[in-house]
Amino acid sequence: MLSFKITTVGASSGVILTKEAMARLRVKKGDTLYLTEAPDGGYRLTPYDPDFARQMALAEEVMHDDREVLRALAK
């Protein structure tokens, strides 16, 4: 388990990630991280945007269900 301390960054607070934490998250400097609520009541820090993932799932469903309509529109 990794632990981090909250530090002051200008007029805000921030967390400094170690190289190991960044490697585990598969992120680099400048990437965006998202804090999401987990089903067990805790929180999860992830590089994946849950709203974007939800939108892509809906788009894939539409592409699958309306395949013929999309094929006709592509002509």
Image: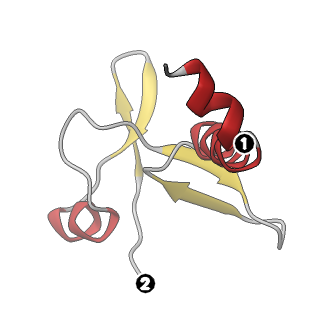
Front residue of this view, candidates 55 and 59: 59
Q: Please name which of the two marks, 2 or 1, marks the residue nearer to the observer.
A: 1
Answer with left or right where residue 30 lies relative to residue 66: left
* Helix, strand or loop at mark 2: loop
Q: At label 2, which amino acid type do we have? A: Met
Q: What residue lies at 23% left-to-right and 32% top-to-bottom?
A: 30
**42 lies above or below 35:** below
- Residue toward you, 75 or 3: 75
Q: Amino acid at mark 1?
A: Leu
Give the structural element (helix, strand or loop) at label 1.
helix
Identify the residue at horizontal 72%, vertical 48% (top origin). Answer: 61
| Residue 19, quarter of the rendered image | bottom left
Location of residue 53 in the rendering, given as x and y in whole percent from the top left corner: 59, 46
Tell me if residue 68 comes above or below residue 57 in the rendering. above
Which percent across, then down, holds residue 67?
Answer: 66, 42
Q: Gap between marks 2 and 1, in whole Å?
A: 35 Å
Q: Which residue does the numbered mark 2 point to in the structure image?
A: 1
In this view, 20 is above or below 63: below
Residue 42 lies in quadrant: bottom right
Residue 2 horizontal side relative to residue 26, left or right: right
Residue behind mark 1: 58
Q: Which mark is residue 14?
A: none
Split into 4 quadrants, where in the image is the N terminus? bottom left
Q: Residue at x 27, y 61 (%)?
A: 26
Tell which circle, 2 or 1, labels the residue nearer the N-terminal end.
2
Tag 2: Cα neighbours inside 10 Å, few (<14), some, or many (≥20)?
few
Q: Nearer the viewer, residue 19 or 68?
A: 68
Image spot of residue 3 (x, y percent): 41, 70
Q: Looking at the image, is 73 positioned above or below residue 61?
A: above
Q: Residues within 10 Å of mark 1 (few under 14, many from 20)?
A: few
